[in-house]
Each structure stands twice: as structure tokens, then as C-alpha cells.
Image: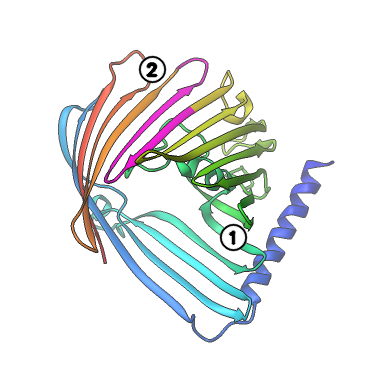
Amino acid sequence: MNNKVSARKLKIYAAGIAAAIATLPATSALADSKLVGSVRIGTTYEDRTDNDGEFFIRNFGSRLIWTGSNNITDSLEGIARIELGLNPDENARGNSGADRTRQLWAGVKGDFGTVKIGAQYAAFYDMVQGNTDIAWWGSCWTQLECARETRVLKYNGSAGDLSYAASVEARSDADEAALDEFEFGVNYGFGSFTVGAAASIHADAIAADGTDDPGGTLIGLLAKGDIGPASVAVTFQTGDEDFANSADDVSNLTIAASAGSFYGLYNQGDSGDASPFFATLGYTLNLGDSALMYFEAQTVDNDDGEDAGIIGRATFKYDF
């Protein structure tokens, strides 16, 4: 199949779905609309290659979130979300202070499932990586596909104990036109345990610098459940060298656990040339309905010949 023809067809399909969502009948105002904010400012101690035992006051993901929904029919609901990152470090003269768009999507939800288009988490994250993303800061340092993506069209559905997701994404190619990333996955729950699998497939593309960006495949596996008083999740991912744009295949093992207010995370990567890892221990102190503090200690080793880094942070989070 011709890649350019396929990309054009997919682009037309995505545009048609977006237009359909935009033109669905709706009331003059959203029936349920909410604006909330979250300020997350704290202190951090870093003893790493670039910072030799220094303290900082930093922003840790402060944000402003608007969500809305309305009933289109008795069985169909329109939904939307705008989540903007806010960073006081950018509040200099002549600067708006906005950090980045974290999420911005619109969609529909019904008995068939949910369809959303825009900036959001893609299917691989939903089915695999999101289950170990439990630390307040830096859960995904050595993982692939553990982040929000832009230009995503995603479907989520379920049938009994089985949940599933599929998404397509236009990556940041030179022409920014082709839909060239495809993800799909499933989760199956039984009792307090869940197992899952997902795949992310990159088609051949053109990088922003004009060079060829060969396609590749990433496979992810998940197992999670309750073991005694703790909730434990384990993910494993393996991708070929084309997917990771590296000389060798890559893999990653992540183990996450939480019990009460305590949580821990271990992440071990392998890119052939290096085996970086990081580990986190954390504690969340609730301060009422709207506020909390979290305390984290991390060790990070990039396997680059430098000593492992030590990081500590204490962050205040207030929601309004």
C-alpha cells in the first residue's frame, strides 16, 4: 500500500471525525462546566552532575484545568478538557507565564465507549505505562510512551472485565501531516488483579530536520494487583532500534508499589549502550480536602560514567 495515499486517507478520516464532533447538536452552554487549579511549588535538593549538592525552589507541574460536558442525546454526551501548565519561573517581563498545553481535547461518550481528539494520553499509556506512573514527579524517566501526546485520535471501550483502547497520532514530522503512529492495547481484570498488553507502531516518516525517521514497534506488558496491604504494578516494554532511534533494541522494567500514604518506584532501562535506572521512595501527607505535601527521595544513574545522582524534594500542592 502506498504510504502517502494511506496517510492522506487517514488524515481525511480524522478530519471527518473531528468535524462530526464539532457539529454535533448541543445546548447553548455546557450543562456541566468546571474550572479548577492546582498550585504545586516546593523545594528540591540535587546532588548530580550539573548540581553539586544545591537547594532550589521550583515549580512542580502547577496547572489550570477546565472540563465540560453536556447531554447531546439521552445516550450520547459531549466532553472536553483544557489543561494548561503554569510556571512562575516563566513570569518575566514580556512573557505570558504559560508553561505548556498539557491536554486539550474534545470528544463524545456513550454506550459504545469514548472517542476523543486532541492533545492527550494515547492508548499505550492507558493500557500499560499509566499503571506505574504513581510518583508525583519523574515516574517515567527511562520509559518510552509514558507521556501526553499531541494530535491524537483515541477510542476507549470496555466489555465486562475487558477494557481496550486504540489511537492514531500525527507525530512531529517535517510536513506535520501524516498519521504515522498507531497504538492499541487491552486490559483484563479478575478479582483484584489486572493483566494487559499494548503495542505502539511508528510508520516511516520524515524527521523535523528533513532526515528519514524509520518506523518501528514497541510492545508493552502489564501485571498489577494487591499483595497483602500493598498495591503492586509491574510493566515491561521492549522496542526495536528503529522505534527508539538507537543502535540497539531497547527495553525497560518498572516496578511500582503503594501502601497507605507510602509509595515506591524502580525503573531499569537497557538501550544496548547503557542501562540507566532510577528509584523513588515517597510519602504523601494530606492536609485537608484541598491541600497536601509530598516528600520524595530519588537516586538516578544514567550509566554515563558519572556517579549516581541523589534528589530530594518537598512539595506543597494546593487545589482550588
Q: Where does the image place residue 137, in percent across and percent down from the top left?
A: 32, 42
Q: Quadrant of the N terminus?
A: top right
**Principal SS element in the magenta part?**
strand
Q: Is residue 145 left or right of residue 84?
A: right
Picture residue at 46% right of the left edge, 24% below the top: 269
Q: Where does the image place residue 67, in percent across and percent down from the top left?
A: 44, 69
Relative to 7, say whether 273 is above or below: above
Q: Where does the image place residue 307, in percent across and percent down from the top left?
A: 28, 16
Q: Is residue 138 visible?
A: no
- Which numbered marker is on residue 303? 2
- Which numbered marker is on residue 167? none
Rate crowding at label 2 as few (under 14), some (14 to 19) or many (20 or more) other CA atoms within 10 Å: some
Q: Is residue 102 visible?
A: yes
- Which numbered marker is on residue 117? 1
Look at the image and give the residue range highlighted in magenta. Answer: 253-274
Q: Is tag 1's residue or tag 2's residue first in the polypeptide sequence?
A: 1
Does the segment drawn in magenta span residue 188? no
Q: Residue furthest right?
A: 1
Does the segment drawn in magenta span residue 265? yes
Residue type for callout 2:
Asp
Residue type for callout 1:
Ile
Q: Is residue 222 left or right of residue 177?
A: left
Picture residue at 27% right of the left edge, 52% below the top: 90
Choose between 187 and 90: the one closer to the eye. Answer: 187
Q: Quadrant of the C terminus?
A: bottom left
Q: Is residue 27 left or right of residue 20?
A: left
Q: SS class of the residue under badge 2?
A: loop
Q: SS class of the residue under badge 1?
A: strand
Relative to 6, say whether 51 is above or below: above
